[in-house]
Image: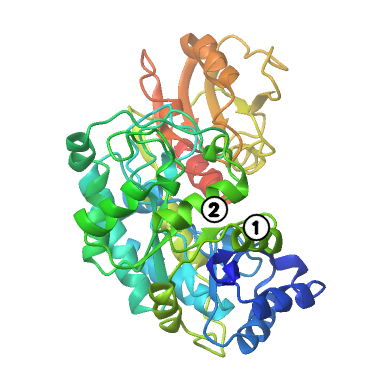
């Protein structure tokens, strides 16, 4: 049998025109679809239409759009992360559904019919390097409610949702892109927290579920990743009564441990998994699987694909949702403590990435033209310029939650502790956990992400 039918290889949006022949060849060989990374909306839309025309049944065109189409494509709206949407929804009910509708409309226009969201992980571990603001909440009930709302909204707008990362990545302390995480919880503990959002999403009509590369002995006693586990698939089918399609997390992640790509792929298919996501060499993997002698039925997968739209739903591009993105960003900003007027502010930026807070500094300077600032980057170290005596010190932290990064640089917390005695305000443009629990009279501001809008809105708060 041809094993291309179980593969969802990577599609580089920026290369779809130049590499269209290669993608067409993969369609002819029978791949289930593609996972899209990058590109421009109109070019991708045009290329996908050509790929769909070649397919006998609709292709799964999927993408990681947790923050909307702009997360991957130029010409789409970039929305705040799930934690910000959740916070804004608590302040102004209705915003979350609007955000989910925006995501779905823009994705459908681009030709994407499957979104790898909702994230159904519960943000229970402050040291988690890869979930954090990608989760709706630290509370399973909130994750359950918003996850189900997202799934239902996608389905209503002809987009297939994919809940992830079963059975829950929120309690881990390592990133499964880099190593296999261990979830040391009993089945009772999992049912009380991690599994609640998945059960609610299944009840809402979820058609696809992603298995995390996670070692969960309560489900798979051998310690193997649940993504290749027969016990995990049985649990999902029998205990959770899920009849939809099961897909692995990306097959190029190091969370698969010591197994080779072909070994892990064979184990996953033998376990009952329907789809293998992001194989690095799809043709070679399909050949190796064929040589292994496996014989896998694919009726469920064929039925799933037949429900997908073969062509984009609209010929007219939907309006962008920039105003909605700004409103959610503004409503989500959370302050713990009291914001008092500054007399002589001095900003210290801590960053372990490319973002250096230029929009934040620029907006603050509108109120304080002589604003002093200093920057710590790289591996930490000394401030470029120490805060002068008598200044009100504001620290702004920029640390993006990113695959293969392994979390915030350790020196950020060390630097924050060293500054603690002189701080007046601490702002996190990312994970709220970076600044939670600061002592003294420090006011904490949670912005949830580092967009220019978030930086400008925080600055407005401080310019009182």
Q: Which quadrant would the C terminus be assigned to in this image?
A: top left
**Residue 156 image position (x, y, % from top left):** 33, 78
What element does badge 2 sit on? Answer: helix
Residue drawn 58% across and 43% down? 253
What percent of the width, then of the height, locates residue 382? 69, 12
Residue 130 appears at what percent x and percent y? Answer: 49, 38
CA neighbours of label 2 inside 10 A, class few (<14), some (14 to 19), many (20+): many
- For the N terminus, the quadrant is bottom right
- Of residue 378 and residue 450, the one placed in the foreground of this image is 378
Near-viewer residue (136 or 430):
136
Would you identify the image quadrant in which residue 183 lies? top left
Look at the image and tell me whether residue 9 can be seen.
Answer: no
- Mark nearer the viewer, 1 or 2: 1
- Cβ atoms at labels 1 and 2 below 8 Å apart: yes
Residue visible at 35% across and 75% down in the picture: 155
Residue bearing the label numbered 1: 288
Residue 267 in picture, x, y percent from top left: 48, 50
* Marker disc for residue 419: none
Q: How is the image coloured?
A: rainbow
Viewer-proximal residue among 77 and 123: 123
Q: Give the residue pinned by disc 2.
A: 265
Residue at the front extreme, as displayed: 293
Please report whichever mark, 1 or 2, sits nearer to the chain's N-terminal start. 2
Q: Is residue 105 left or right of residue 22?
A: left
Q: Toward the viewer: 389 or 203?
A: 203
Image position of 407 with respect to 207: above or below? above
- Say which residue appears at 28% left-offset and 50% top-offset: 143
Tell me the distance, in whole angstroms, between the alpha carbons under discs 1 and 2. Answer: 10 Å
């Amino acid at each position: 049998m041809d094993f291309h039918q179980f593969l969802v290889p990577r599609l580089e949006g920026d290369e779809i025109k130049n590499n269209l022949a290669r993608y067409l060849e993969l369609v002819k060989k029978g791949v289930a679809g593609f996972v899209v990374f990058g590109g421009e909306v109109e070019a991708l839309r045009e290329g996908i239409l050509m790929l769909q025309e070649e397919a006998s049944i609709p292709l799964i065109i999927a993408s990681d759009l947790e923050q909307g189409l702009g997360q991957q494509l130029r010409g789409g709206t970039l929305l705040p992360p799930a934690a910000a949407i959740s916070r804004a929804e608590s302040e102004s009910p209705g915003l979350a559904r609007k955000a989910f509708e925006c995501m779905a409309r823009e994705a459908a226009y681009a030709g994407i019919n499957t979104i790898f969201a909702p994230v159904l992980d519960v943000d229970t571990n402050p040291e988690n390097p890869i979930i954090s603001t990608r989760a709706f909440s630290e509370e399973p009930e909130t994750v359950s409610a918003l996850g189900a709302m997202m799934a239902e909204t996608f389905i209503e707008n002809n987009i297939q949702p994919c809940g992830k990362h079963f059975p829950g990545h929120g309690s881990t302390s390592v990133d499964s892109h880099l190593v296999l995480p261990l979830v040391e919880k009993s089945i009772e503990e999992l049912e009380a927290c991690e599994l609640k959002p998945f059960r609610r999403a299944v009840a809402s009509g979820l058609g696809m579920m992603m298995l995390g590369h996670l070692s969960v002995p309560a489900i798979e006693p051998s310690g193997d990743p649940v993504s290749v586990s027969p016990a995990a698939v049985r649990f999902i089918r029998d205990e959770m009564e899920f009849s939809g399609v099961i897909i692995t997390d990306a097959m190029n992640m190091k969370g698969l441990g010591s197994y080779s790509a072909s070994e892990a792929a064979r184990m996953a298919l033998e376990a009952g998994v329907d789809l293998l996501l992001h194989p690095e060499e799809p043709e070679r993997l399909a050949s190796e699987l064929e040589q292994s002698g496996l014989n896998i039925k694919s009726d469920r997968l064929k039925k799933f694909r037949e429900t997908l739209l073969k062509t984009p739903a609209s010929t007219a591009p939907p309006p962008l949702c920039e105003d909605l993105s700004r409103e959610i960003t503004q409503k989500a900003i959370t302050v713990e403590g009291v914001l008092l007027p500054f007399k002589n502010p001095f900003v210290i930026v801590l960053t372990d990435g490319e973002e250096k807070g230029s929009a934040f500094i620029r907006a603050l300077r509108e109120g304080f033209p002589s604003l002093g600032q200093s920057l710590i980057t790289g591996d930490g170290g000394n401030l470029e310029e120490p805060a002068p005596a008598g200044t009100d010190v504001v620290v702004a932290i920029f640390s993006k939650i990113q695959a293969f990064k392994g979390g915030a640089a350790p020196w950020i917390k060390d630097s924050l502790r060293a500054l603690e005695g002189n701080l007046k305000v601490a702002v996190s443009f990312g994970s709220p956990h970076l600044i939670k629990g600061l002592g003294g009279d420090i006011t904490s501001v949670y912005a949830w992400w580092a967009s220019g809008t978030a930086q400008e809105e925080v600055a407005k708060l401080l310019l009182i």
